Amino acid sequence: MYSDQHLRVSDAEREAVSGRLAEHFAAGRLDQAEFDDRVRRAMSAKTRGDLRGLLADLSETGAPAGPELGRGGGGTPGGGPRGPGSPIEFRLDAASGVPTYLQLVHQVEHALRLGYLTLGDQLPKVRDVVASLAINPNTVLKAYKELETKGLTAGRPGQGTFIQATLSQVGLPELAGLRKALLGWLTAADGAGLDEDGMVALFTSALRDFHERRGGSRARGGAASGETEGVA
Amino acid sequence: MSMNVVEASGLGKRYGGTWALRECTLAIPDGHVAALVGPNGAGKTTLLNLAVGLATPSAGRVTVLGGRAPGSPVALDGIAFVAQDAPLYKNLSVADMLHMTRNLNHRFDQGYAEARLAELGIPLNRKAGRLSGGQQAQLALTLALARRPRLLVLDEPVAMLDPVARHDFMAIVLTAALDDGVSVLLSSHVLTELERVADYLILLSRGRVQMAGDVDDLLASHRVLTGPAGEADRYAERPVVHVRRAEAQAHLLVRATANDPVPPGWEAHPVGLEELALAYLREPGAAALPGPTLPGPARGRHAESSEVTR
């Protein structure tokens, strides 16, 4: 296994570890003082190594520790074998001001554009989304209904909700090539001294020129907008 | 499904010379997770106690589960209430608490309760008082849900819990709402998190209902307009709820949908539930109430606008 001990961790990973510490506490493997101390250390952890240390001496009877840590990071889209269940997991941004059901809709569309989700893939089960995010079931149902209305998904009775259309007309290999070209451009822009905001501004402005030259047709929803979100 | 789980008209409760709740008129439809929000002393606990039959009205009337009297046999059977601070007998073991609750109630799903406690890792032989705060809350919730209620009433359920325990507690409440179709009425003075938990909101202020309705409808019928402070008064004819004004810039919370025209030079933004509730609480004179709260599908005038995606 490659060493990711020094990779920086996100709030989501810190919370995942806190959640597991709570399970160990509930199971009696930690007393209150140890639990409080470890949660405090988890919340201030900077690297994967810091987090692993907090769980190292706790036996795992439930789910293994590996896959959950570092999930949702910047993995390769579409990479790796697909097991049963959904290839994606939802997250919520309380500070975004975007209604919760729309956040779920946007995340599915985004995952479709970037190839995390393809035809026939299953969306997370409503019950699992409710349990893992502690959100109102009606919100999840509303998001799934919206996706179905848009023609992107279809419900199969007793099984779940599945992708039946894709947003990206571009195949994964082409998408990877375009991404590579864009990364080259980003490197050049960085070399020229442009900061991130400058790059976004330049890209957005160039995109606008491109649309105008095309005669004002707003070809949204294709690869172009997918890449925009990938950059921003 | 068009039953109201709680319905009140002109409801009031007086303790001595003080009205804890007055002229309360509302109808909470079935199938929702409804949040009762308001500052301390607004009358939240009083309203809940009246609904579950622990207090009797000084004025007006309240009914539950589609017109039943609180405290009537059907109401007692169909409503589970968890009072503030997870009331448990601290010296009883978890198993004894289960035993007692089963004997005191008409209906009690022992298998469900034991399975839930095992999932949560709560040992049956431990005394309730020796459980962590989160576990005590989970035990009280398990006892309530094992009664298989149609309406679950929770008074400040998560106020004392840490973030992880709060999340886990609400996850169980919300999965019960999905699995068993339990309607939920919970009170809280914590506004954050409510947006993702509640789909119906009742805002209580100084003993009166100030705002009530479907959360999506409430959000879709309000916008924040940002523009030059000098022009703020020109929009006084619009239904402005709340104004925040600096020397140059003003933010107006107005009753308007995404389809309403925006005045030139002004920007319109959608509003979040917390911002909306705070604005109303700061303007005790403002009110946003559904029309006549009659039984039946009280879903409203803004149903179309809530489908708009921006």
Image (cartoon, coloured by chain):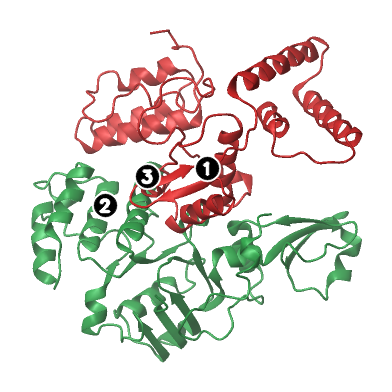
Chain colours: A red, B green
Which residue is at 66% across, 60% downward?
B308
Q: Which residue is mark 1?
A: A92
Q: Which residue is mark 2?
A: B138
**Depicted B138 relative to depicted A28: above or below:** below
Residue A41 shows in the view: yes
**Which amino acid type corresponds to the residue marked 2 in the rendered image?**
Gln
Which residue is at 32% across, 82% downward?
B55
Asked which secondary structure carries label 3, the reply is helix
Q: Which residue is mark 3?
A: A128
Which residue is at 36% across, 85% downward?
B63
Could you tell me residue B188's position as x and y percent?
A: 45, 61
**Which amino acid type corresponds to the residue marked 1 in the rendered image?**
Leu
Q: Chain of mark 1?
A: A
Identify the mark nearer the N-term, 1 or 3.
1
Tell me whether marks 2 and 1 sit on the same chain: no
Asked which secondary structure carries label 2, the reply is helix
Q: Please tell me how crowded label 3 is: few (under 14), some (14-19), or many (20+) other residues with Cα within 10 Å.
A: few
Q: Chain of mark 3?
A: A
Between the residue at mark 1 and the residue at mark 3, the CA separation in whole angstroms equals 14 Å
Which numbered mark, 2 or 3, is in the foreground of this view? 3
- Left or right of residue A69: residue A165: right
Which residue is at 69% across, 39% downward?
A221
Could you tell me residue A133's position as x and y percent?
A: 43, 45
Q: In the rendered view of the protein, which quadrant contains the N terminus of chain B?
A: bottom left
